[in-house]
Amino acid sequence: MSRTALRICPLCEATCGLTLTLEGTRVTGARGDRDDVFSKGFVCPKGASFGAADSDPDRLRTPLVRRDGELREATWEEAFDAVAAGLRPVVERHGPHAVGVVLGNPNVHTMAGALYPPLLLAGLRTHSVFTASTLDQMPKHVSSGLLYGDAGAIPVPDLDRTGHLLLIGANPLESNGSLCTAPDFPGKLKALRARGGTLTVIDPRRTRTARLADRHIAIRPGTDALLLAAMVHVLFEEDLVDLGDLAPHVQGMGDLAAEARHFTPEAASAACGVEADTIRGLARALAAAPTAAVYARIGTCTVPHGTLASWLVDVLNILTGNLDRPGGVLFPLSATGRSPRPAGPGRGFALGRWHSRVRRHPEAKGELPIAALAEEIDTATDEGSPVRAVIAVAANPVLSAPDGDRLDKALGALDFMVSVDPYLNETSRHAHVVLPPPPPSQAAHFDFAFNSLAVRNQVRYTRAAVQQEPGLMAETEIHARLILAATGLHGAAPDTVDAMVVEQTLGRAVTEAHSPVHGRDPRELAARLGGENGPERRLDMMLRLGPYGDGFGARPDGLTLEKLLAHPHGIDLGPLGPRLPQPLKTPSGKVELLPGPIADDLPRLRRALGERAAGLVLVGRRHLRSNNSWLHNVPALTGGSNRCTLHLHPDDAERLGLADGAQVRVGGAGGAVTAPVEVTDGILPGVVSLPHGWGHDRPGTRMSHAALHPGVNVNQLLDGSLLDPLSGNAVLNGIPVELTPVATN
Ligand SMILES: Nc1nc2c(c(=O)[nH]1)N[C@H]1C(S)=C(S)[C@@H](COP(=O)(O)OP(=O)(O)OC[C@H]3O[C@@H](n4cnc5c(=O)[nH]c(N)nc54)[C@H](O)[C@@H]3O)O[C@H]1N2
Ligand SMILES: Nc1nc2c(c(=O)[nH]1)N[C@H]1C(S)=C(S)[C@@H](COP(=O)(O)OP(=O)(O)OC[C@H]3O[C@@H](n4cnc5c(=O)[nH]c(N)nc54)[C@H](O)[C@@H]3O)O[C@H]1N2
Ligand code: SF4
Ligand SMILES: [Mo]
C-alpha cells in the first residue's frame, strides 16, 4: 500500500514543497505539492529525483571509527567516545583555535545545521572557523554589514512585481536561484516578460537564463564591479539619481559621487569588453524603469572585487530609489527572525577583529577564508598552534575549495578529524570518525535561512515523512552530542543542549523592552512550549517570539508551532513590504553609502581600469541536475549533458587546434587537469568554462556511481592565494588558465 507525505525539498534554495509517494519506508516518487502556499506545485528534475537521492545505497547507515588506520563500522556510543577522546586533548594541549570547524553548504538545508553549529562555535570559542560562505556569498554579507550594519540584511529582488530586472552573474534556470528564494524562478522570469517587464542578463556565457532575456551582455569575467561603478557614474553625471522615499535614511551621497567620477563608462569599457554606450544605456534604463531590481550572484561574488561588486549592486538599487520599495529590492521578514527592535543606531559591523595565523587574512563575520584552511593546518608559525583537529559538518572542501590536493594531504595529517556526513567522500575519507545523518525523508524540515531570503513572506514546516530507521540517529541529536563531546560534557543528555538554549533565549527575551514577553517569567514560558522534541520546542519558541508570533499569548492570533502544524502546506504571510529604517543597525542609524573599508578598497578598482588578462580565463557553470559535489552518485541525475567538459569558443578551438571531444590539459596556478573539450559559441572568446564538484577518483571513498564518471576537480587549478581582500572569498571565476592539447592515439 502506498501513501503520500509532504517534504520541503532540501536540494536547493528554492525550497519547493514536495509530495512524496512512499512504499513502506521507501520514497518511490516525488512531485510538486500543488497546495504548497509558496511553490504551488513547482518541481525540478532534482526534486523529482528526491527518492533516488534519499535511497542511495551508498549512504552510510552506521557511524565509522578509524581503528588501525581503517574506517570500520561502530556503535554510536563508540563513535562519540572517540570524538571526545580525539578532540579534548587537542583543545587542552593546544587551545581552542587548534580545532578547526568546517561547515558546508547543506547546513543551510537542514534544521540541525541551522540550530546547532552556532552553539558548537560558542562552546569551543575557536577562531578557526571556515565555511562554504567564503566560496560563495561572503562579499554580500560584508557589503550588507557595511551598508546596513547587519551582515544578514540582504535585500532580495521583488521578482513577482518588478518591471525591470538586471540579473548579473547568476543562472537561475540552472541553479533555481540563490540569495533569492523563489520556487519556479524560471516561471517568474517568464511572467516578468509577459507583463511587459524587461530582463537583462550580464554573463560571459549565453546561459539558458540569458537566452530567455530581452538582452544579454557578454562581459569579460571579473570586471562587473567596473561596469557597475560606471553605471553609478552615469547616474550622477546625467542627474538620474532619485532616492525617493529613501532620502531620509541615506547618508554619504556626496562622497560617493566624488568617488564615482573616476569610473567613466569610457574608462571601464575596454576592461569589461562592453561598449561605453551600452553601459550608459543600462544606467538610463535602470533609472527610467518605474520599478527595477539589480540582482547579482556567484559570478559577481567569487571574483577579485566581489565585495565592491556586491556593494555596487545595492548602491544602484539605492540611487534609483528601488531599495525597500515594492517592485524593487526588499528585506524579507522571516517568521523565525528576532522580533524587530525599534529603529535606531546600532553597533555596526566590524571586520578583521582577528586574523588568520599564516597569511594574516582578516576574519569576516567570525570566519576565516576557507581557501586558507590547508595552510592553517600544514604551516607552522611563531604565533599559536596550527589547526590539529577538524570538525567537518556537511562539507567537502577537498573538491569545493581551492587546491584540493594540498588540503587532501593536510587533512590526512591531522591529529583528529570528525565528519558529519552521509557519504564517505573525498573529504570524509580522512576522518577518524564519520557520523552519518539519516536520509532527508527521515528528517523534519524548516527553512531558517531561506525564509529570510524569500521573495514572499511565508512559513512552512514538514515533519519527517518516514519514521527513522533503527540504528540511525537524527542529525539534530548528532549535533547535540557532538557539541557535548567537543566541549567537555561528553555523556550529558542531548536534550540539555536544547534546554539550555531555551533557558537563555527566554531569559534574554523577558528583559527586552520591545519583546512581547517583556517582564514575564521565563520558566512559565518554557513550560508552555509545544513540540515533540528539543528542536521542535526551539522552533515553537522562535515562532512565538518572532514578528508574527503569538508572543506566548500576548497576540492570541499569532503563530505557534501548533498552528503551523495545522497548515501542512504552509501559511502565506504576504508580499514583501517596506521595512526601513527598522533593519538598519549602523552607528548612524542610516544606510551608510560609502563605508570606510569600501572607500579604502576603491583605489584597487581604479587600478583595474587599466588591467587586461593576457590569455584565457576560466569561469564555472552549474547544471540543473547537479548540486555542488554530492549528487553525482545519483544515476538519475548524471546522464545527458550533466558532464564535466571544458566549454570553449569555436575561435579559440580553431586557434588552438582543438576539436570537439578532444582531451585538453588545463593548467592554472595550483595545478592542471585534463578534460574533454566541448566547442560552443555560447561562451565569450577568450573564456573557457568547467563545472565544479567533480573529481571523484580518489581512493578510499564510497560513492560507486560517481566513481564511474569522476570528472576532474576544477578547483585544483587554484592555489588558494587569490581572494577578495575584504571578505576573504575565494576567487573562483575569471582565473587565468593555459590550454595544451593532449596527444591521443
Ligand atoms: N570552482 C567553483 N567552486 C565552487 C563553486 C563554484 O561556483 N565554482 N561554488 C561554491 C559554492 S557556492 C558552494 S556553496 C560550495 C559548496 O561546497 P561544500 O560546502 O563543500 O558543499 P558540497 O560540495 O555540496 O558538499 C556537501 C557535503 O555535505 C554532505 N551532505 C549532503 N547532505 C547532507 C545532510 O543532510 N547532512 C550532512 N551533515 N551532510 C550532508 C555531502 O555528502 C557532502 O559531503 O562549493 C563552492 N565551490
Ligand atoms: N543545479 C544546481 N543548482 C544549484 C547549485 C548547483 O550546484 N547545481 N548550487 C547551489 C548553490 S550552493 C549556489 S551558491 C547557487 C548559485 O546560483 P547562481 O549564482 O545562479 O549560480 P551559477 O549557475 O553558477 O551562475 C553563475 C553565473 O555567473 C557567470 N559568471 C562567471 N563569472 C562571471 C563574471 O565575472 N561576471 C558575470 N557577470 N558573470 C559571471 C557564469 O557563467 C554563470 O552563468 O546555486 C545553487 N543551486
Ligand atoms: S527547484 Fe530546488 S527546491 Fe525545487 S524541487 Fe528543484 S532542487 Fe528542489
Ligand atoms: Mo553556494
Image (cartoon, rainbow, N blue to C red):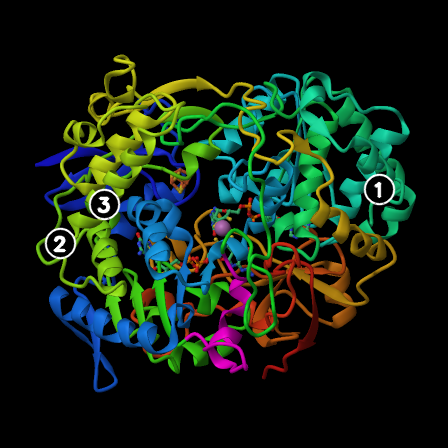
User: Does the beta carbon of the residue at mark 1 sit less than 8 Å from ligand 2?
Assistant: no
* Foreground residue among 152 and 608: 152
Distance between the alpha carbons at the discs numbered 1 and 2 = 57 Å
* Foreground residue among 488 and 85: 488
> Could you tell me which residue is drawn at 17 percent across and 49 percent down?
496
Tag count in the figure? Answer: 3
Tell me if residue 255 comes above or below residue 39 in the rendering: below
Quick check: 740 left or right of 564?
Answer: right
Distance between the alpha carbons at the discs numbered 3 and 2 = 12 Å
Distance between the alpha carbons at the discs numbered 1 and 3 = 49 Å
Q: How crowded is mark 3: few (under 14 residues within 10 Å), some or many (20 or more)?
A: few
Secondary-structure class at tag 1: helix
Check the picture and name the quadrant holding the N terminus.
Answer: top left
At which x and y percent is residue 738? 71, 73
Query: Of circles 1 and 2, which is in front?
Result: 2
What's the residue type where badge 1 is placed? Glu
Instruction: Please give the residue where the numbered disc 2 appears in the rendered image.
Output: 493
Instruction: Please give the residue where the numbered disc 1 appears in the rendered image.
Output: 259
Check the picture and name the quadrant holding the C terminus.
Answer: bottom right
Q: How crowded is mark 1: few (under 14 residues within 10 Å), some or many (20 or more)?
A: some
Q: Is residue 719 magenta?
A: no
Asked which quadrant contains residue 701, the reply is bottom left
> Could you tell me which residue is drawn at 13 percent across and 36 percent down?
532
Tell me if residue 635 comes above or below residue 414 in the rendering: above
The residue range painted magenta reads 367-387
At which x and y percent is residue 43? 38, 35
> Tag on residue 500?
3
> Could you tell me which residue is drawn at 72 percent across and 39 percent down?
216
Quick check: 106 left or right of 136?
Answer: left
At which x and y percent is residue 259? 84, 42
Q: Regarding ligand 3, which quadrant of the image does it lie in? A: top left
